[in-house]
Image (tube, rainbow, N blue to C red):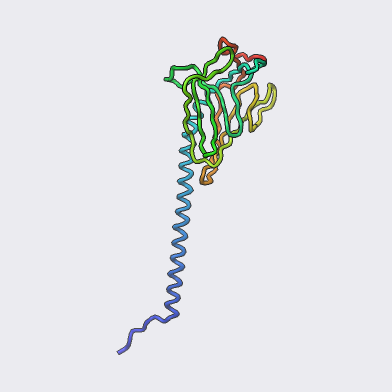
Amino acid sequence: MKHARGFTLVEMLVVLALLALIALLVGGAISSGARSWGAAHSRAIGMEDMLALDRVLGDRLRQALPLRLHNASGAGRRLAFIGTENTMAFVAPMPEGLDFGAYSALTLRYTDEGRLDLTWGEAVLQDGRLRTAGTQRTVTVLENARSVSLRYFGRAAVGADPQWADTWQPRPFLPDLVEVKVLSADGVDWPPLRIRPRVTAPAFFDGSGLNGSGGGP
């Protein structure tokens, strides 16, 4: 009667090594798949946030008014649009359905907490000056951003070639484009969101109404 032959120590070690190699390969594939899914998920969330930002900010900015107002000193006029790398202030018509004012003064600001806040309220034009009235409202249009930067494209003066600038003050025109660049908290660099105001011609307010022909300083 013959005895069944068992595995030798060398054969057992070879089998264990092969099993370890297979486990390593499978684990790496699962980890890579999880990372790919996580990156795709972050990009999808970023696209949703970008579309939401365009709906809220883009709707108002595309209706920005090129008002030229009297300076506080009374000397000269200034455009009712101020832009820096992380803030922007402008004037637009009130949203439809809100009848308590003809204009709204809006301020977009990136905060140290990683939020992009849009504050707006009723704006009243009196004697060529813009005055805010009533309750100011703030809505957070973006959260958990590592950084947000704004740029502006347009002409610095009549006859000048348009170019990109980090600030927009003082200028005789509204910018042709406003660019919003976002770096999310998890390091995803969004594609730039570019918004074009519908009105870019110079205009001013002379105390009695809007004049689209442009006015002197």
In the depicted structure, whether residue 50 falls above or below residue 197: below
Q: How many numbered marks, from 0 up?
A: 0
Q: Quadrant of residue 23?
A: bottom left
Q: Quadrant of the N terminus?
A: bottom left
At 54% from the left and 27% from the top, the residue drawn is 107
**In this orientation, does residue 107 appear?**
yes
Measured from the top left, where is residue 104 in percent x and y?
A: 51, 21
Q: Determine whether 177 is above or below 132 in the image.
A: below
Percent across and percent down for residue 149 are: 58, 36
Furthest residue toward bottom: 1
Q: Residue furthest right?
A: 159
Q: Residue at x 42, y 20 (%)?
A: 97
Q: Residue furthest top?
A: 208
Task: Give whichever of 44, 1 is nearer the camera.
Answer: 44
Residue 64 lies, in percent from the top left, at 54, 23
User: Which quadrant does the C terminus fall into?
Assistant: top right
Which residue appears at 48% of the width and 29% of the height?
138
Rendered image quadrant of residue 178: top right
Q: Is residue 211 visible?
A: no
Q: In this image, 32 relative to 151: left or right?
A: left
The x, y position of residue 55, in whole percent, is 47, 30
Q: Residue furthest left?
A: 1
Q: Is 92 placed above or below 38 here?
A: above
Residue at 62% across, 16% down? 70
